[in-house]
Image: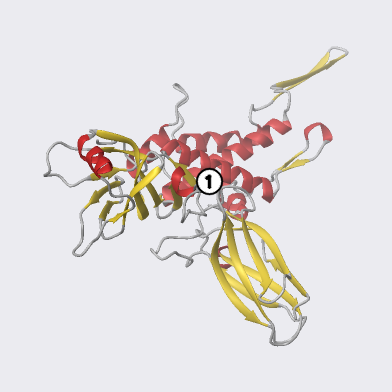
């Protein structure tokens, strides 16, 4: 029987956009203590807004007790059944973990890590130009750690997603009724809690029924149900829907042999369905929404935005009271020094502001506007 499992990782943050294997492959070293032939599993688990989600798992058999075993997970190749990445960037720090657990018994160990759009080393070398991220404000040392760089990078990633009104990577989107404890088959793991869509009956019987989800880039639809208030009345299978990924428009076009799964059949419900012009919050859905991956221009925007925040913190730490000049005078002799408002980082910060489209006259950020036009488009819903 396994008595001890110890897990260590090669680093605390990883990125699936990193070309080097050291940054994109999660390398876990597991040291088991037990009997030869005992089996344990090494799993990658992601914490969602709902339940934890198992990303990948590998069984390992003990050959020699106490001898470390290396298990690898390649972030660039981990995909779900639809071929979509199952390792989007972290919504919170340390929301991924590698867990080793004995198949028999309760022995386990786990180590958390973070998935980021850019690694701290790349931020330091490429985007911060190797500048020393250490200052001595008032003689007190101040430095920016890799952990702080990860925090700032994730914040820039989240800010870009919020402005663009799109998930930058595949996210699990679900509506409230499908995660209810009263649901027979609830969705357990999800990232975004969305709103149901109303049913609108078009005049006549010519057009196919369509549903416009309030999300850009619907990559995969997993469930689609119709509800009258708290009662589910119909469940559509994948034989019924056709998804237009860019617009998020779902058309109900049945395949040959497609069947409807009615939960309740009654003249009252059927009459209401035909006679009512609209039914509020009728469509409940579970879908994967977002870009397939963060495009390179958007990665660069995020990197510059994070660099600006880091350099701004350093400049503020160097001159915490906003000093712009120093004058010393004694016995008729004076000496004056002028300081750049942003210290030694002012030229690089000005360059990044221009590249990100910051307009000094209006105070607007036109860089994200251009990225939104290129990758997302307008927010529009057709009823």
- Rendered image coloring scheme: secondary structure
Q: Name the residue under label 1.
A: 303
Residue at image point 67% right, 62% down = 11
Query: Quadrant of the image for the C terminus?
Result: top left
* Percent position of residue 301, x then y: 47, 43
Query: Quadrant of the image for the N terminus?
Result: bottom right
* Percent position of residue 345, x then y: 62, 36
Residue 223 found in image quarter:
bottom left
Residue at far front of view: 267
Residue at image point 47% right, 43% down = 193
**272 or 173: nearer the viewer:** 272
Residue at image point 60% right, 33% down = 346
Compared with 239, 376 (above or below) is: above
Tell me if residue 171 can be seen.
yes
From the viewer's perspective, tell me whether residue 303 is left or right of residue 335. Answer: left
Residue at image point 41% right, 41% down = 230
* Percent position of residue 311, x then y: 63, 38
**332 or 130: nearer the viewer:** 130
From the viewer's perspective, tell me whether residue 155 is left or right of residue 68. Answer: left
Q: How many marks?
A: 1
**302 or 281: nearer the viewer:** 281
Tell me if residue 175 can be seen.
no
* Percent position of residue 187, x then y: 48, 54
Q: Which element carries disc 1, helix, strand or loop?
A: helix
Residue at far right of view: 331
């Amino acid at each position: 029987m396994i008595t001890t499992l110890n897990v260590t990782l090669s680093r605390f943050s990883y990125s699936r956009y990193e070309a080097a294997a050291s940054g994109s492959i999660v390398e876990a070293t597991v040291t088991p203590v037990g009997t030869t032939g005992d089996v344990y599993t090494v799993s990658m688990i992601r914490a969602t807004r709902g339940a934890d989600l198992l990303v990948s798992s590998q069984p390992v058999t003990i050959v020699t007790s106490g001898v470390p075993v290396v298990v690898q997970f390649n972030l660039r190749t981990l995909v779900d059944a639809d071929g979509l990445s199952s390792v989007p960037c972290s919504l919170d720090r340390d929301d991924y973990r590698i867990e080793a657990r004995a198949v028999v018994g309760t022995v386990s160990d786990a180590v958390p890590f973070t998935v980021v759009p850019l690694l701290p080393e790349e931020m330091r070398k490429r985007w911060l130009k190797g500048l020393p991220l250490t200052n001595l404000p008032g003689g007190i040392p101040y430095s920016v750690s890799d952990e702080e760089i990860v925090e700032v990078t994730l914040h820039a990633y989240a800010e870009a997603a919020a402005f663009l009104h799109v998930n930058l990577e595949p996210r699990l989107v679900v509506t409230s009724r499908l995660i209810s404890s009263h649901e027979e088959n609830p969705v357990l793991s999800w990232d975004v809690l969305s709103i149901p869509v109303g049913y609108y009956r078009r005049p006549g019987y010519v057009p196919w029924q369509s549903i416009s989800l309030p999300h850009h880039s619907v990559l995969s639809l997993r469930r689609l149900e119709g509800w009258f208030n708290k009662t589910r009345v119909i469940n559509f299978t994948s034989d019924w829907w056709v998804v237009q990924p860019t617009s998020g428009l779902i058309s109900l076009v049945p395949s040959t042999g497609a069947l409807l799964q009615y939960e309740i059949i009654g003249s009252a419900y059927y009459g209401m369905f035909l006679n009512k012009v609209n039914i509020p919050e009728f469509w409940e859905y579970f879908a994967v929404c977002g870009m397939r991956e963060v495009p390179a221009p958007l990665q660069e925007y995020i990197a510059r935005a994070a660099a600006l925040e880091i350099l701004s913190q350093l400049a503020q730490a160097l001159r915490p009271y906003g000093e712009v000049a120093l004058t010393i005078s004694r016995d008729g002799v004076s000496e004056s020094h002028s300081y750049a408002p942003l210290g030694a980082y002012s030229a690089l910060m000005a360059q990044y502001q221009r590249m990100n489209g910051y307009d000094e006259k209006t105070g607007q950020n036109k860089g994200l506007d251009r990225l939104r036009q290129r990758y997302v488009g307008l927010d529009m819903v057709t009823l």
